[in-house]
Amino acid sequence: MRLQNKVAIVSGGARDIGRSISVKLAKEGAKVVVNYYDSIEDGNTTMDAIKAVGGEAILVQGDMTKKTDVDKVVAETQAAFGKEIHVLANVVGGIVARKMLAEMDEDFLNLVMRLNVNSTFLMSQAVVPHMPKGGSIVNFASQAARDGGGGGSWAYAASKGAVMTFTRSLAKELGPKGIRVNALNPGLINTAFHDTFSKDEVRAKIAGMTALGREGHPDEVADVVAYLASDEASFLNGVNLDVNGGLAFS
């Protein structure tokens, strides 16, 4: 159990990749704070999965684009598990909708940036003062940050590119304090994200272009997060790690 006695916050931890991460970290011994936004049903399902593996967790609602909600998550974490927070997985994010340049207005752009960039910044800023030496932050960028994404996703791709750069900069800032900051760039993972925003024929084509010939599973992403959160990754810092089955090489 690589994360025994560690406290971990998973923003957006109630479904899809976030759920897999929450369950995996709990299985590895961490006390997990599962943040959800609007679906208590998803949150309860994740809590049931954590209990099934013998894990310990609390469920906290909050909009991670709002500082007041971010501060609430941190406060409830400390009330339940003590002052120190050892792991932060910034999973919150999304494409919102596919829009071409001519279809987009400033409000939509700002919404996408808040969801993907501001949430990562706010959570990191709130947690770092309580993170001891050996702490680990795992951010979520995207394959879209590498290649610009599919049609109508330039705002999402740009926001995830900002997450990549933020990760590198924060790794330099926090490295001297013994805190590591890394990010994942998932490729095609079988989640509700693609059920909503990607056509079946596009998914089949991308899966066929992937060296392993298939989509990834959220548990495969969670395994990488658990590794990055653990002491086994003690000399990895500022890395933007592609988890795409060989779809593309950076």
Image (cartoon, rainbow, N blue to C red):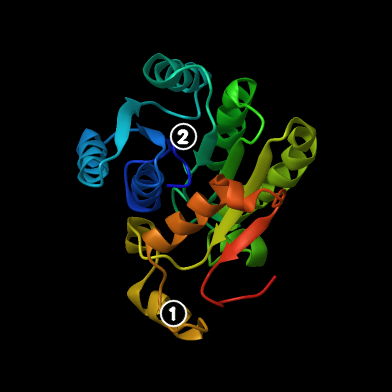
Q: Residue 64: x and y, percent?
A: 47, 30
Q: Residue at x 30, y 39 (%)?
A: 55
239 up-or-down from 48: above or below: below
Describe the element under mark 1 as helix, strand or loop.
helix
Kind of residue indicated by mark 1: Ala
The residue indicated by pointer 1 is: 207
Q: Determine crowd level at label 2: few under 14, some 14-19, many 20+ residues with C-alpha closer than 10 A.
A: many
Q: Which mark is residue 12?
A: none
Q: Residue 59: x and y, percent?
A: 31, 29
Q: Is residue 114 visible?
A: no
User: Between 9 and 61, which is closer to the camera in this rendering?
Assistant: 9
Describe the element under mark 2 as helix, strand or loop.
strand
Q: Is residue 124 visible?
A: yes
Q: Residue at x 44, y 36 (%)?
A: 11
Kind of residue indicated by mark 2: Ala
Q: Describe residue 179's horizontal placement relative to residue 216 as left or right.
A: right
Q: Describe residue 235's horizontal placement relative to residue 98 as left or right.
A: right
Q: Determine crowd level at label 1: few under 14, some 14-19, many 20+ residues with C-alpha closer than 10 A.
A: many
Q: Residue 219: x and y, percent?
A: 38, 59
Q: Describe residue 119's horizontal placement relative to residue 195 as left or right.
A: right
127 up-or-down from 250: above or below: above
Q: Describe residue 93's horizontal placement relative to residue 13 as left or right.
A: right
Q: Residue at x 41, y 79 (%)?
A: 214
Mark 2 or mark 1, whichever is nearer to me: 2
The residue indicated by pointer 2 is: 8
Q: Residue 81: x and y, percent?
A: 41, 21
For marks 2 and 1, give the CA distance: 32 Å
User: Between 118 and 57, which is closer to the camera in this rendering?
Assistant: 57
Q: Quadrant of the C terminus?
A: bottom right
Residue 76, by quadrant, is top left
